Amino acid sequence: MSGNATKEQIDAVIKRVHSFGLRTHPIFGVRKTVIGIIGDDKTRVVENMSGMPGIEKIIPILQPYKFAGREVHPEDSIIEIDGVRIGGEEIVVMAGPCAVESREQLLATARKVRECGAKILRGGAYKPRTSPYSFQGLGEEALKILAEAREQTGLLVVTEVMDPRNVELVSKYADILQIGARNMQNFSLLTEAGRSGHPVMLKRGPSASINDFLLAAEYIILEGNNNVILCERGISTFETYTRNTLDISAVVAVKKESHLPIIVDPSHSTGKSFMVTPMALAAIAAGADGIIVEVHPDPDSALCDGPQALTFSMFEDLMRKAAALAPIINRRI
């Protein structure tokens, strides 16, 4: 729409599109409104709507990801949740244990990461484990502990949802729904998370291309939920030294192709605690909008992913170095 299009003109265009049996997805930008049209009947739209008042131009979108791409949304998206802005000048740090093991463990970690400058607490209530005999998480009990930690520290909470049937329950406790790497193409889960309207952090699958990654985000946005945060967490390659191969170039690629903010997980990508800080700093230097790292009061006794968890002192060191690095690229922690 043109920059001076009125609400009445915008409403008239939307009504006209609906009369063709097509769906609309309005995007209200700072300077302009874009009305995304979902459907294949491009010819009828162009022929019948080009002269309508308020329309500046009609553009066929060539990218396979229509709403996650920059053709429709050229400006960077900033996801704001209770005053925390993801995608802006500030680099947001999410930190906490892989899994909520006990009230004491989580509250101690929450207080420490908050003291060091983290804004969001991570902690798994439901854990997708390769072995059915591994610790699977505490479920709703863990969600209640996460909510208590939020009340005590003011940190936002991000936690994974694995089942479409649990989206409503997890949304009741968490500020951000995490879609894990193994569920990146669980399309029913993506759709349900989109319908919830809740902010979603989507992790890249271990064998997913950038195209696959952005198309997964498209499922969420298509349901009217624009609050999507992408997360690069490493991909599978022939290398066996690390748990996965952290694709730092994905940050740069996603920034070019998409308006969505992207953060990096150096813990799951490397699987080794001594590599987390260097890879986190590399992600920040590449332009990541945030990092998500695992922190545990006693990694040696952790029930899940202890070898990749930072101790409290290691996390303090990471935050000091990140705070020194950020101003060099005109950002801040």
Image (cartoon, helix red, strand yellow):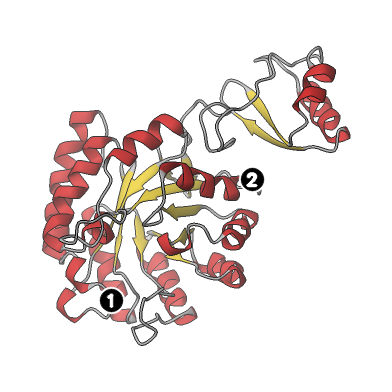
Circle 2 — which element?
loop
110 versus 21 height, above or below: below
The quarter in which the C terminus is drawn is top left
Circle 1 — which element?
loop
Q: Is residue 50 left or right of residue 180?
A: right
Looking at the picture, tell me which residue is in the foreground, 27 or 37.
37
Q: Is residue 89 visible?
A: no
Specify the farthest residue to the bottom.
133
Q: Residue at x 51, y 29 (%)?
A: 70
Q: Amino acid at mark 1?
A: Cys
208 versus 15 height, above or below: below
Q: Position of residue 279 (x, y in %)?
A: 19, 49
Q: How many marks?
A: 2
Per the model, the C-alpha gap separating discs 1 and 2 is 34 Å
Q: Residue at x 75, y 26 (%)?
A: 42
Q: Residue at x 20, y 32 (%)?
A: 327
Q: Is residue 314 left or right of residue 62?
A: left
Q: Residue at x 36, y 81 (%)?
A: 131
Which mark identifies residue 19? none
Q: Is residue 193 left or right of residue 112?
A: right
> Would you name the residue on which mark 2 appears?
222
Looking at the picture, tell me which residue is in the foreground, 147 or 231.
231
Q: Are marks 1 and 2 in contact (CB under 8 Å)?
A: no
Q: Position of residue 146 (x, y in %)?
A: 41, 71
Q: Amino acid at mark 2?
A: Leu
Q: Is residue 94 left or right of residue 328?
A: right
Among numbered discs 1 and 2, the one appearing first in the sequence = 2
Q: Position of residue 8 (x, y in %)?
A: 81, 24
> Would you name the residue on which mark 1 appears?
304
Mark 2 Cα shell of 10 Å, populated few (<14), some (14-19), many (≥20) = some
